[in-house]
Amino acid sequence: MLASFLIFWVTLVAGVMGTGTQTYLALPGQALLALTAILSLIRRRRSGVDWKLVLPCLAALIYLGLRAQLSDISYLARPDIFLVLGATIAFCLSFLEGERRSFRTAFLGALVVLAMINVAIGFYHLRDPTYFLLPGYTRQFPGDRIGGLYTNPNHLCSFAALTLPLIIGAALSSRGRLIRLGLLALVSLGFGLVALITLSRAGLIGLGASLALLVLFLARAKVRVIRFRVPWWVFAAMALVASVALVVVIQVANKRGDVLLDTLSQRQQMASTAFSQWKENPVFGTGAGSYRYLSNIYRSSRWKAHVQERSPEFAHNDWVQLGAEYGLIGVALVLLAVFLYYWRVWDWLGRQDGLDASRSEVIFVAAASAGIAGVLIHSFFDFNLHLWSHVFGLSVLVGLSLQLTHARGGRERPKRSDFAGALALSAFMALVSLFLCSHWNVWRAEDYGVKGIRAAAAGEFTVSNQLLTQSLEIDPDNGLFLTRRATNHLGLAYRYRGFPQVKQSYEAKALADFERVTEINPRGFQGWFSQGLVLTELQRFDAAAHKFEEALKLAPYHRVVHFGYVRFLLAKSISTKDTTFAEEALTYLMEILPRLGSTPDSEALVRSIRQFLEDSKK
């Protein structure tokens, strides 16, 4: 039980802290989970698999993994591959060990501990919004919103939607009046209050839906869960906490009303962009990670100027982004697995005759199913299905629920299909383990790369380049680390601007790295745009013009690209002493400003061009 708790804890915390900890925590945790699953199969020697339910889940996971493997951009698709592998391992292991109460207790314990830590940090945020438990992994949010360990309050609220039904279910199925009251009054209300202060509208919708489904599932099962009379003071305390929470939410909403409406508009635009991308390849999608670079092509001209600065990695609507990147096949397989899961749970909860399940198991299945629904509903407005901790929790709960609804089938003797299922799952888990081991060098490359990025953030460009070079020697097609190393070269070129030969040497290295980035990802505007900037500095204006043209095609609504092109024209005019190019730059800038919006940067650019033209006349 302790070993299971530690594995769950490591993987959950890795998902909470973000991508930076995957190399250190999540990926080794996956390897341990795979080993544990194989040992479990060897010990049990049979799985008792209900293939009608398990095969659709595995089919969806296998398709998503293969589609990610075949994505055009390997380094952007890699997180999806490891995420799918982790979900598959967690699902298989949980299905195998779902009958063991200690296994369920270990997972629930890890969730509760993590929930309590989020509660504590969340309330501390209200006292000191600048507090960071882990610098670089958590950030503050304006308007008294809290995120706990999560880097986003919305994700904390989604975690509440997943965890709160399970905590309530544990309280209802526990023995002893005092334990029930303590868990319900302290943990549930405290965590519910934290969910309210996150001020996530979509997250609260998911939370409300999960609690409503919990009541519906318990009513379906006809389980009498409350066997004691609740004292009046418990209701009084609940009313008091609810009143305080309502006041806090109203105050925060008044402070951030305009920001909330603006955020809603941004998410609508992101989802619209993903829909447009989906039309490019409606059946198979455009590949894992492709939204990050194709969204620049399909953005609407109505998208506000300050949003155009960003290249969002996620569409803030996981179901639409799933269709855009994996196509109708991916969406259909996932929806089929979800439908079959809930159909099985609903049917199982309604069968009282011959149902050989304890009261605690019935409540656990109902609570787990309700929590899963809360996250899935919230995912229509956010990217919860890209968070390791959420996906890991969902996979474990699905596996445990399916095992509990299947394990009491009444079969006394194992069938041949049981041994065949054990053999098939053992072979599958062995292949997964081999895949993880074969990617050990990729993990090492990620380790070097993350350290290199941190060194660059500290201004240690030489050290950063050494680490990034070590990473690229192992993983030469990682466009993210190539871009970071090229940026370091530009920083060193600026540092040695008084030494022309050294400066040109670093600029040439940066240009070579950016060229490699465009080879890996020809549809990403960053590589083309960066080449244009370097070539402009080298005064190779004809080549720079071609690079900027390609960047503008790929990012027609990205303000930084347009301003970079204007600066290119101004630099060319200064170098050639021909005011024609400066006049062209001014005309171009004035034409695009109504669409992109005026900013202090654009105003300064206009003034510099006009000043150059006035000086040229003198």
Image (cartoon, rainbow, N blue to C red):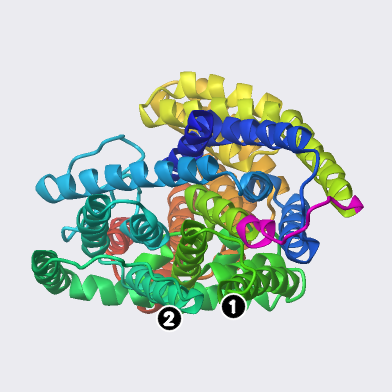
Spatial CA distance of label 1 from label 2 is: 16 Å
Viewer-side residue, 366 vs 407? 407
- Report which quarter residue 172 is drawn in: bottom left
Crowd class of label 1 (few under 14; some 14 to 19; many from 20; radius 10 Å)? some
Which residue was labeled with disc 1? 275
Q: Is residue 511 above or below residue 529?
A: above
Give the residue drawn at x 18%, y 67%: 230
Q: Position of residue 445 (x, y in %)?
A: 62, 28
The kind of residue on which mark 2 rests is Arg
For the question of whether residue 329 can be seen, the reply is yes
Residue 266's disc number: none
Instruction: State the residue at coordinates (16%, 69%).
Output: 249
Disc 2 is placed on an element classified as loop
Local crowd at mark 2 within 10 Å, few (<14), some, or many (≥20)? few
Q: Secondary structure at mark 1?
A: helix
Magenta residues, start to end:
403-416
Residue 406 sits inside the magenta stretch: yes
Magenta-colored stretch includes residue 101 = no
Numbered tag placed on residue 302 in the rendering: 2
